[in-house]
Image (cartoon, rainbow, N blue to C red):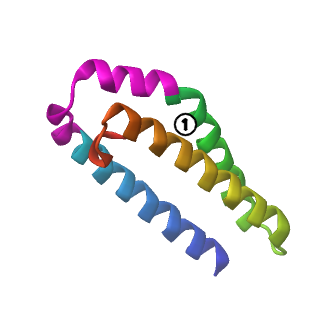
Amino acid sequence: MKKHIIAGTALAIGLFGAFSASAAEACDKCIEKQALQQFNQETSGLTATLKAKILELRGLYGYESVDIHKVNQLEAEIKELKDRIDLSATKLGIPPCSRG
């Protein structure tokens, strides 16, 4: 049962990611390419770390007994990384639809 929930969640996240990517393609016309390139360059390390933390969190949810302290720590780290990425985007004038 737990595997079905995890599989359903992964599918939903994958579909949302595909939708977000297509929305970002449509919105990329509303910003300067140089600003987007600078944003991607400034946040590439943060984005890689964010993806790794999200995968680690997903892995924790796959265990029978979840270490809630570790989950809380990872969720806080993920929120901080997202906040730093959003701050960089705001500084460069990148709208949310283009932060792919």
The quarter in which the N terminus is drawn is bottom right
Mark 1 Cα-neighbour bin, 10 Å: few <14, some 14–19, many ≥20:
some
Q: Which residue is mark 1?
A: 47
As drawn, the residue found furthest toward the top would be 34
Q: Position of residue 53 (x, y in %)?
A: 68, 48
The correct choice, above or below, for 33 with respect to 96 in the image is above
Residue type, label 1:
Thr
Q: Is residue 14 above or below residue 43?
A: below
| Image coords of residue 12 (percent x, y) | 42, 65
**Front one among 72 and 65:** 72
Q: Is residue 21 magenta?
A: no
Instruction: Out of 28 and 90, give the one closest to the viewer.
Output: 90
Q: Residue at x 32, y 48 (%)?
A: 96
Q: Main secondary structure of the magenta part?
A: helix
Residue 32 magenta: yes
Is 11 placed left or right of 26 in the picture?
Answer: right
Locate the C terminus by quadrant.
Answer: top left
Residue 69, given in percent of the width and then of the height, sits at: 84, 68
In the image, is 38 to the left or to the right of 32?
right
Q: Identify whether 63 is placed above or below 54.
A: below
Residue in view at x 75 percent, y 66 percent: 72
Q: Is residue 48 visible?
A: yes
Q: Residue at x 30, y 44 (%)?
A: 21
Residue at horizontal 28%, vertical 43%? Answer: 95
Q: Residue 46, how many percent across, how many down?
A: 59, 35
Q: Is residue 67 visible?
A: no
Q: Residue furthest front?
A: 91
Classify residue 31 as left or right of residue 9.
left
> Which residues are the magenta region?
25-42
Badge 1 marks a residue whose secondary structure is helix
